[in-house]
Amino acid sequence: MYEIVRKEELAANIYLMDVVAPRVTHSCLPGQFIIAKDGEDGERVPLTICDYDREKQTVTIVVQEIGASTGKMHALSVGDSFTDFVGPLGLPSDLCLEKNLDDVKKKKIVFIAGGLGAAPVYPQVKWLHEHGVEVDVIMGSRTKDLLFYMDEMKAVAKNVYICTDDGSFGFEGMGTNQLQALYDQGITYDHCVAIGPMIMMKFVCKLTKELGLHTIVSMNPIMVDGTGMCGACRLIVDGKVKFACVDGPEFDGHLVDFDLAMSRMAQYKTEEGRKKLAFEEGETHHGGCGQCADADQGKGGAQ
């Protein structure tokens, strides 16, 4: 059992939990995720590792209540426990690997966090700050009431630019508008990480491609099972089959087929849609170990 030792409401229907999980904290890094389950009959829910404390052996997760399973999680209190808390899963961010640190220090980096994307952006920015790399962050939300992690982000970032779609706080506009405004002021970058809703990442990539700005995106919004077995997070990257949970969740945003990914995500929500996708995609529908797609893709499947 994995005990909840802290619970805090960050915004409407968005809450933070610190969970005791020694095995996860032993080796986790920013960019990875866990799978949590509440009760033996509960649904497996993939959640980003938003922070961790190796000394206290706790992992921080941020959950938005959008359905029955996350609603049950919302009902949990300090002292309650998750039945399962599996991880770390997925690949760590390339920026947060010691072996890449010298190259990372040469880059001028901007993170763009849309909505709940502030949660997975924060641990990366924090890790980089702790290793002597200062980065800028653009935090965007629909409205002021949905913003969170602002103070935490300001403590670890060089500059934090906050924007809201309705202008209720900070810059009026979306993250793309804020990035373009910075470029108009002569503030440029050579590496961007965008994390947030699929449509947000798509339009960030459209802009950054025009700007010649290399961009990494996190495809965690399309995960369901989190182990590659369900096929939900199958996507096309540079013409090849990939699975976000085992090959990612981070990919080169300029190579991701966002239109196909969003279409699959909508279709996957119905039983009929899932069966149709499984029929059309054959053996490449399921990720499994991330390697089984090669046979039907001319060695161009999940690597």
Image: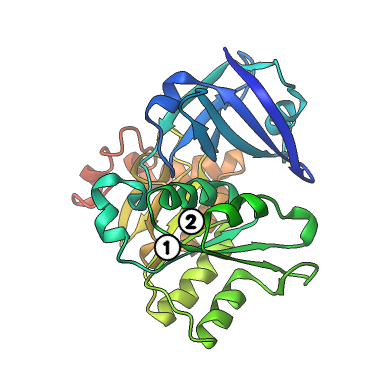
In which quadrant of the rendered image does the N terminus lie?
top right
Residue situated in front as seen by the camera: 268 or 192: 192
Residue 165's x, y, as percent? 73, 69
Side (left or right) of 253 relative to 155: left
Residue 191's x, y, as percent? 38, 67
The disc labelled 1 sits on which kind of residue?
A: Asp
Residues tagged 2 and 1 counted as in contact (Cβ below 8 A): yes
Q: Looking at the image, which residue is at 47% across and 36% down?
A: 33
Quarter occupied by residue 107 = bottom left
The disc labelled 2 sits on which kind of residue?
A: Ala
Rendered image: mark on residue 144: none
Q: Secondary structure at mark 1?
A: loop
Whether residue 266 is visible, yes or no, is: no
Quarter occupied by residue 176 = bottom right
> Please, is residue 212 above or below residue 97 in the view?
below
Rendered image: mark on residue 257: 1
Residue situated in front as seen by the camera: 56 or 289: 56
Label 1 CA crowd tier, 10 Å (few <14, some 14–19, many 20+): some
Whether residue 192 is visible, yes or no, is: yes
In which quadrant of the rendered image does the C terminus lie?
top left
Residue at which label 2 appears: 261
Side (left or right) of 82 relative to 227: right
- Residue situated furthest left in the rendering: 299
Label 2 CA crowd tier, 10 Å (few <14, some 14–19, many 20+): many
Residue 194's x, y, as percent? 49, 61
Quarter occupied by residue 167 = bottom right
Cα–Cα gap, marks 2 and 1: 6 Å
Q: Looking at the image, which residue is at 60% across and 57% down?
A: 154
